[in-house]
Amino acid sequence: MENKELKTNNIENKYGIEYTKQGDYYMPNLVLEKEKIVLNKYGRMRLNFLKENRKAEYTIMFVNGTLNRHLKEIQETADNRINLIIEQLKQQNNLTEEMKSTDQLYWVSMMNNLKDVAEEIILNELIYV
């Protein structure tokens, strides 16, 4: 078999699409724009949930290019809701900064419990739906 060298000739048509000649064929120069995002805990959890449990929804978002936007929105919403829920729970349980300085172990224990409760709410509201 002989190796044919690829020729690159750009041809524009009335639709504004450029083509590159490869052998006997003209291939369109299609480039997907990739938005790079850094996924946090909630973004990764949502991605895994979609891959494992909502395969059709995951595939549609992936093909349409809306997956990154969706994951970014989920993780921003989750972060905001976690902070809001923790603040509300702190007020309900009368956890103050004075308590933090007087009984640190109790305060840390309560804050860990409140964070766990808030995360459980977020998982059920945003991630696993």
Image (tube, rainbow, N blue to C red):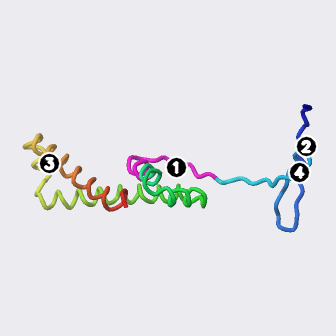
Q: Which residue is mark 4?
A: 25
Q: Amino acid at mark 3?
A: Met
Left/right placement of residue 55 relative to residue 17 reads left
Q: Secondary structure at mark 4?
A: strand
Quadrant of the drawing holding the C terminus: bottom left
Q: Amino acid at mark 2?
A: Lys
Q: Which residue is mark 2?
A: 7
Q: Mark 2 or mark 3, which is nearer to you?
A: 2
* Structural crowding at the residue carrying mark 4, measured as other residues with C-alpha within 10 Å and reported as few (<14), some (14–19) or many (≥20): few
For marks 2 and 3, give the CA distance: 68 Å
* Structural crowding at the residue carrying mark 3, measured as other residues with C-alpha within 10 Å and reported as few (<14), some (14–19) or many (≥20): some
Coordinates of residue 7 in the picture (x, y in percent): 90, 43
Q: Mark 4 or mark 3, which is nearer to you?
A: 4
Coordinates of residue 5 in the picture (x, y in percent): 90, 37
Q: Mark 4 or mark 2, which is nearer to you?
A: 4
Magenta segment boundaries in residue numbering:
34-46
Going from the N terminus, do you reach mark 1 or mark 3 first?
1
Left/right placement of residue 124 relative to residue 104 reads right
Q: Mark 1 or mark 2, which is nearer to you?
A: 2
Q: Amino acid at mark 4?
A: Tyr
Q: Which residue is depicted at the point 60% across and 58% down?
A: 63
Going from the N terminus, do you reach mark 1 or mark 2 first?
2
Q: Quadrant of residue 28?
A: bottom right
Q: Which residue is mark 3?
A: 110
For marks 1 and 3, give the CA distance: 33 Å
Q: Which residue is depicted at the point 17% across and 49% down?
A: 113
